[in-house]
Amino acid sequence: MLLTPIPSCQEDEKAKLEEEEELRSREAKELEEYKKRMSLPGKFDYLQTQTGTENRRLVFATSKYMKIII
Amino acid sequence: MLASADLCKGLREVFEALLKEEDPEILTKLVPLLSDLTAIFQEIKTNESDSPSKELKESKEKEAKDYGFSQASETKSYLEDVLGIGNALSKYHNWRLEIKFLEGFPIYYEIFDMKELNEKLASYLINQVKEGVNEVRQKAIEMLVKFMRTNYLSLKFKELMKVFIEEFCNSNCYQMRIAFINLFLKFGEIFSRTFIKQNLLNQIFLLKADKTVQVRRKLASHLAEIRGVLLPDDTENIKKFAELVKRLAQDLDKEVSGVIVL
């Protein structure tokens, strides 16, 4: 068992890695879409920095709260 | 038009009543169709909740967009009711039907909100791995790995990987450690070797010194598959694998050492 070479997997590996990469980028794409929906440019990034969280829901909840207090 | 809307509503009400059923005879007939029916009625439900009035719909959409909540999460989904059917099946110890039930899961990965799936469905499957009979456990592992292949929420994905290691690989129960080997093998079938190397390989190597002979036997019987997920140029892990094989070849249990062909 130890002497036989490990089967090559280049094509299969490449396809799987691409699929995994696409899966990982899906969340980032969704986040980009949410950002676009925000009315003021840079508002999301600002809130994200201010709240110190990457939790999208918390950031949006904060934006809702800010609309009330501002 | 009105008649078809009424019919639709009527059918949806019947379906919702069926989701509350616990009668074994009804469940036997319902389960093989459940995932398809759920997909149909979830779509109807989502459309209905969108349609009350144009103004209301637009205001709801605006609100959802403003605060980042998807429409899917605004409408209560059928996922919880569907999982309730799974719990009813476990109560009747009907593992064959439970397997049929689990086989329908990939459809749910497409129709329900990913956050809800992470919160409810993943924990249901983990519970089935822990408490289900062996056949159900195997199927739950398969569905869990398939779910991970569609799970694009990075934070939740990482949390689940941590749960697998803590609650299966590091479990005091030897059956959970065997479940971890099965989970590893399923990951190996559909994930890249790079992913396996980064997330699971070290844990599987640690099991060579497991105190329970059944775990070592399981490991020894799947050496070819474990070797098959190594990257050909990953000398470090190829070396670790050789150490694993040598260690198992010297195992005092004949069923462990007997299956090793160096």
Image: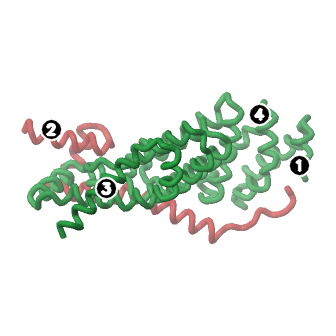
Chain colours: A red, B green
Label disc, if present, on residue A23 of the rendered structure: none
Label 4 element class = loop
Would you name the residue on which mark 3 appears?
B12
Residue receiving disc 1: B259
Q: Amino acid at mark 4?
A: Asp
Chain letter, disc 1 residue: B
Q: CA distance from mark 2 to mark 3?
A: 37 Å
The picture places residue A63, in percent across and down from the top left corner, at 17, 43
> In the displayed structure, does residue B252 sit left or right of residue A19?
right
The numbered mark at residue B210 is: 4
Q: Are marks 2 and 4 in contact (CB under 8 Å)?
A: no
The span from disc 2 to disc 4 (Cα, nearest Å) is 53 Å
Please state which amino acid type lies under the numbered disc 1: Val
Q: Disc 2 marks which amino acid?
A: Tyr
Residue at x 45%, y 63% (from the top left corner): A22
Q: Residues within 10 Å of mark 1 (few under 14, many from 20)?
A: some
> Mark 2 or mark 3: which is in front?
3
Instruction: Residue type at mark 3: give it.
Output: Arg
